[in-house]
Image: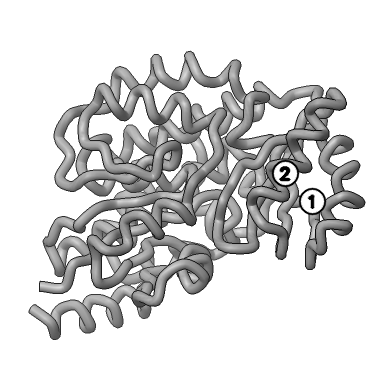
Amino acid sequence: MTKTAFLYPGQGSQAVGMGKSFVEHSQEAARMLEAASERLKTDMAHLLFEPNDLLEQTKYTQPAILLVSIMGYRLFAKEIPQAPAFALGHSLGEFSALSAVGAIDWLDAVELVHLRGSLMQKACEGIEAGMMVVLGVADEDVEAICHDARQDGKKVWPANYNAEGQIVIAGIKSDLQSLEEPLKAAKARRVMLLNMSVASHCPLLEPAVEPLVEALKGVLCDEFAAPVISNVTAKAYNTKTEALDLLGRQLVSPVLYKQSIRDNDDLVDRYIEFGHGGVLKGLNRRTTKKPTLVVSDYDSLCAVIETVAQER
């Protein structure tokens, strides 16, 4: 049997209309949409399918992305009920991965990441936080530039190691902007502030850690159908105790996505990404030669099911 890893994207993959074809073709997806609306007291159909200002707010972005990812995964799993070699998510996607392997009920996960987004927003209130993508500079050079800036009192940290030559920095926006000159001197191909009002995966989110871990205690279980790769360590875990430690640390530690793919690539023959946009497929092209299939809407779901079923 082909050994497969399941992948789940994070913030930045959202778009108006995502998940609509799942709901139009599946009663189960429609029921999930209704249940999530009731749990969050939010019209998820409006949030997902109609132009609005909420989808870009972290506390709504996170449950929206997770819901669509889990819709795609559950519809796939109905037809192809197999456990992955491991599950891996990018930032928020780690919670989707935990839900997919049974460590968190999917509806509890929707509510949990709504809280997570709210805690992240609250931690960054009044400090003009932000994130900046850097292309074409080696990791060690970005790390050194950030280190030197912190020595000068600036608040900037590497936050996402996405792929070779692509790293995201988090911190105070004005401090991030001050790095443009040294990064361009280091031959950066592109330096761009992202449309975000939070600084993910850096010490600015320390106030969010304890309340998130407290919430996790009530919803996490030890029933992992497959191991999950930690964003913090790039290593597998499969217990509630480990998850409580790692998911708290994840808020204030960089996402080791590139390292997670590289260090676990020998365990699998391919990847399947569940979520809108195929963002992780794009990152994977720079890190692995193994294929990444994408379940982003109903048509791609059917295509992936057909591909996998032919191998069984």
Q: Which residue is mark 1?
A: 193
The residue that appears at 39% across and 29% down in the rendered structure is 246
Can residue 274 be seen here? The reply is yes
Q: Is label 1 in contact with label 2 (beta carbons under 8 Å)?
A: yes
Whole-percent x and y of residue 279?
52, 65
Judge from the rendering whether residue 31 lies leftward or rightward of residue 33; answer left or right: left
What residue type is disc 2 on? Met
Question: Tag on residue 131?
Answer: 2
Colour convention of the picture: one colour
Amino acid type of disc 1? Leu
The x and y percentages for residue 240 are: 24, 26
On screen, 127 above or below 110?
A: above
Q: Nearer the viewer, residue 174 or 306?
A: 174
- Taking depth in this image into account, of 162 and 295 the one nearest to the observer is 162
Q: How far apart are labels 1 and 2 at the CA level?
A: 6 Å
The residue tagged with tag 1: helix, strand or loop? strand
Question: In percent of the image, x 32 and y 71: which residue is there?
Answer: 25
The residue at the point 72 percent across, 59 percent down is 137
Give the secondary structure at mark 2.
strand
Q: Which quarter shows the C terminus?
A: bottom left
